[in-house]
Amino acid sequence: MKRIALQGMALILLAGCSTAPVGIHNTESPQQAAGQPPDAHDAIPALTHRAKEGDANAQFELGSAYAQGKGVAKDLTQALEWIGKAAQQNHPSAQSRLGLIYARGEGVNKDLAQAAQWLEKAALQGNAAGQYNLGILYLEGMGVKKDPVAAAKWFRKAAELGSVTAQFNLAAMLANGQGMTADLTEAAHWYRKAADQGDASAQHKLGLLYLNGKGVAQDTAEGLVWLNRAAETNHILAQHHLGEIYENGKFNVKRDSQVAVKWYTRAADKNYGPAQYMLGLFYELGKGVAQDTAQSLQWYRKAADNGHVLAQFALGVIYEEGKLTQRDRAEAIKWYRMAASKGYAQAKEKLESLADKQ
């Protein structure tokens, strides 16, 4: 799962810890960047006066107001002008924001090289947002030569300053051995830092590390705590993994099909194909729920529509054999073909068998 924004069925394998890093985004409010309390707002005329007098903080705040349309009509040209003036005065947050403007092409032609230059200026002044976003540019090779080592360096600097996204990205790179030697113990450290700040993806990853005893001592109770925290904040993979754990009694957890259904349903309701497939199976078998052929067929179809190959194959069998609905050769062939197109060997065999029966 790649968490990108301008600033992934085997049962709970450690490979589930390989989430790709989060992308570029803004991490601070103008008021925080200027060292003012979040509820302190200058009237626009007074702010404009200070900005024209050369106050870099005022220039940055005014530009940010224009960028967001707060207290003044949104105007990206004015935003670029005032943020640019503050950046020229070495205002680190303005430099970081200007880098984002060029990276996104907000009111200006997109220019990743310019973005990298401004982000580096901010990063060298210790601006965590600039360090984090510069790390993303190096990681993706945007405006600079791709360099995972440099990316890891900047993520680490931002992580040490408390950036939760940098902490998550650093942990992911440490877990994967990307840009540095793999180190699950240190990865767990940084996942914990991000998890303690409420990052659901970090909570999920930390939970998996505890369950698998990777980078930390194996601790099922602690692993479940972190998975539940992530799941309760609607992290889909955490919800699905909890469903798998309670369905299969993994990690010496007592099997509980009803609890499994609860978590599969939470994930399925967010259109997650693997969980939808499992609900189709549970309703077909009456496992943890009353047997319901209509519900089973509905969930299988939702999963199949989301590209889940096992659900597509299951629908093929259902329509070929008339298991949950009337036989329909054409529908069976349609779903077998979809599964076969993804390389599912049994679907190809079914198509050959149906062809032989013509």
Image (cartoon, rainbow, N blue to C red):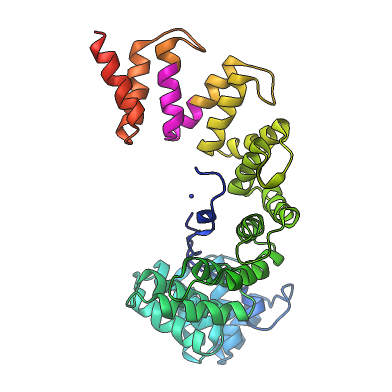
Height in image: 333 above or below 1?
above
Answer whether residue 297 is visible to the viewer in this image.
Answer: yes
Residue 42 lies, in percent from the top left, at: 69, 78
Relative depth, front residue between 46 and 240: 240
Relative depth, front residue between 100 and 215: 215
Residue ID at (42%, 35%): 307
Residue 290 lies, in percent from the top left, at: 69, 18
Residue ID at (67%, 70%): 193
Height in image: 349 above or below 259?
above
Q: Is residue 314 magenta?
A: yes
Relative depth, front residue between 31 and 219: 219
Residue ID at (58%, 70%): 187
- Tag count in the figure? 0
Q: Quadrant of residue 253?
A: top right
Answer whether residue 78 is visible to the viewer in this image.
Answer: no
Residue 233 lies, in percent from the top left, at: 69, 51
Quarter of the image with the C terminus is top left
Q: Which residues are magenta?
A: 301-317
Q: What secondary structure is the stretch in magenta mostly built from?
A: helix
Q: Quadrant of residue 33?
A: bottom right
Q: Is residue 322 magenta?
A: no
